[in-house]
Image (cartoon, rainbow, N blue to C red):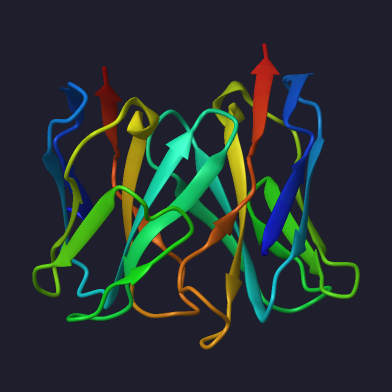
Amino acid sequence: NAGVTQTPKFQVLKTGQSMTLQCAQDMNHNSMYWYRQDPGMGLRLIYYSASEGTTDKGEVPNGYNVSRLNKREFSLRLESAAPSQTSVYFCASRFARDYEQYFGPGTRLTVT
Amino acid sequence: EDKVVQSPLSLVVHEGDTVTLNCSYEVTNFRSLLWYKQEKKAPTFLFMLTSSGIEKKSGRLSSILDKKELFSILNITATQTGDSAVYLCAADTYSGGGADGLTFGKGTHLIIQP
């Protein structure tokens, strides 16, 4: 099992560019999440998908969109990147609520 | 607003010391408290605590939850340099308690000196 995988590992964007971060899990988990981690801020929830076919906003959704493509894949899109979106992005999944979350290796994004 | 506060934010000790990391929480519809270890990459799961007063143990690491006082501690005994990491505490909620997803503290950066 690969667990949770994310691509790319690193990305540099210019302000205004768009990109999609990809996440996939092979653990047959129902729920998937996107977090961002900034220095001194801990992890903050951007969007989540409690089950295939549903998505909902988390704590910091502005500037992002998501797609739950199927049970395995959950992508995060930045339509017009801003320097404030420079961060490390983690995807996570879990079987259901009340279970622990498993995290991917992260994507380090820099917006100049 | 849900809140998780960890202390200290950073800690430097010598190999062999025992450390205690603290986590307090104010969360609506609290379900469980989770601890993760992060070493410059993905957080890895350590413990999930749902009941007060029951210690969970894994090797030199142990953790306990106090649901009355709304806090948890993570103890590491006989520390080793490999324990150097950021330790994250997170609160989870019951279904219907708002957004699915964990509320994290800022983490405790633990450095173990040889």
- In percent of width and height, residue A46 lies at 38, 55
What count of labels does the image hold? 0
Asked whether residue B75 appears in the rendered view, the answer is no
Residue A105 higher or lower than A49, as above or below:
above
> Going by the image, does B55 lie left or right of B101?
right
Q: Residue A69: x and y, percent?
A: 9, 68
* Front one among B56 and B30: B30
Residue at horizontal 33 percent and vertical 41 percent from the top: A89
Q: Quick one: which residue is furthest to the top in this view?
A: B114
| A99 with respect to B12 (left or right) | left
Work out which quarter of the rendered image holds the C terminus of chain A and state it.
top left
Work out which residue is located at the far bottom of the displayed protein and give it: B96
> Is residue A90 visible from the viewing direction of this image?
yes
Left or right of A91, for residue B80: right
- Residue B79, given in percent of the width and then of the height, sits at 70, 30
Of residues B46 and A34, which is closer to you in this image? Answer: A34
A9 vs A45, nearest the viewer = A45
For residue A72, what is the image quadrant?
A: bottom left
Q: Is residue B42 left or right of residue B105?
A: left
Q: Residue at x 72, y 26 (%)?
A: B10
> Where B91 sits versus B114, above or below?
below
Rendering quarter of residue B31 = bottom right
Q: Residue at x 69, y 76 (%)?
A: B28
User: How far from the left and from the top, in percent, is residue A107?
Assistant: 26, 35
In the image, residue B106 sits, relative to residue B80, either above or below, namely below
Up the image or down, A42 lies above or below A14; here it is below
Q: State the quadrant of the N terminus of chain A.
A: bottom left
